[in-house]
Image: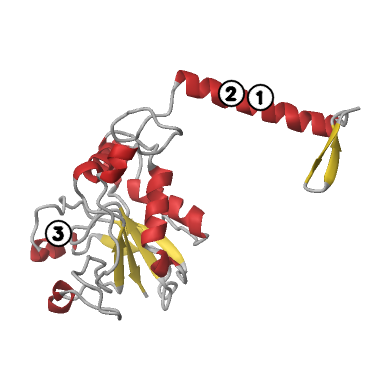
Amino acid sequence: MASMAIGGAEITLSDPAAHSFWTKGALRGALMALADLLLPPVCIACRKRVGAHGLLCGDCWTKIDFIAPPLCERLGVPLPYETGSPSLSAAAIADPPVYDRARAAARYSSTMRKLIQSFKYGDRHEGVPLFGRWMATAGAELLADADVILPVPLYRSRLWSRRFNQSAMLAQAVGHLTGVPVDCFLLARVKRTHAQVGLTAAQRRKNVAGAFRVTAAKGALRAKRIVVVDDVITTAPPPRLVRAS
């Protein structure tokens, strides 16, 4: 009778439950090997072979312009040098945003632009877990004591045509990693808007004025620490998280 010890407990392979466990594990491993043979893991950007699904190759990784400190405490944009204490950029001082703080994972350029566009418009969702890890890391200080994560909603006609809300997918990935509750229905888009890219700050404000509505009962979110997740922010790199108290 064969047996083996796992974590201090001995499992006898003649035990039906143990036999079922190892059989299922072997079957799962065989299926994964077969899947990798039929659909080998490739870089989510350039399609070059990589070691596992949902990853970037080394060349594409080096082309991601990640955002790292020192950062503007308010906007999350890079600062030229470290001051030793929280600092504000000139843009945050001249035109303070309505939110408390924003953080972004990387600049919207080169490979990052390609990844976001293929995600939004090409139904390429295999990178979502990776994007979620990047966002959870970039927004760690915003998420540390957050009460709820809200994805930026799509207008119903756009959601119907696209079939998914990319911001909701990113929010769910971040929530899964951090344990912060995600609510995809507290915020609704009630007006169709134009793309924000290319608009001035004044035009952006006018474009989204009255476009969103909180669906919760009056006062339900009062004093709550809310993190809003979107794929792109027009005044800082994507993907982004915005914190409001």
The spot of residue 123 in percent (x, y) is 32, 34
**Residue wearing tag 1:** 27
Classify 10 Å Cα crowding around label 1: few (below 14), some (14-19), many (20 and above).
few
Quadrant of res 245: bottom left
> Does the residue at mark 2 contact the one at mark 1 (Cβ under 8 Å)?
yes
Sequence-wise first label, 3 or 2: 2
* Amino acid carrying mark 3 in the image: Asn
* Amino acid carrying mark 1 in the image: Leu
**Residue wearing tag 3:** 207
Classify 10 Å Cα crowding around label 2: few (below 14), some (14-19), many (20 and above).
few
Mark 1 lies on a secondary structure that is helix
**Residue wearing tag 2:** 31
- Observer-nearest residue: 58 or 178? 58
The spot of residue 27 in percent (x, y) is 66, 24
- Observer-nearest residue: 222 or 26? 26
In the figure, is residue 173 to the left or right of 204?
right
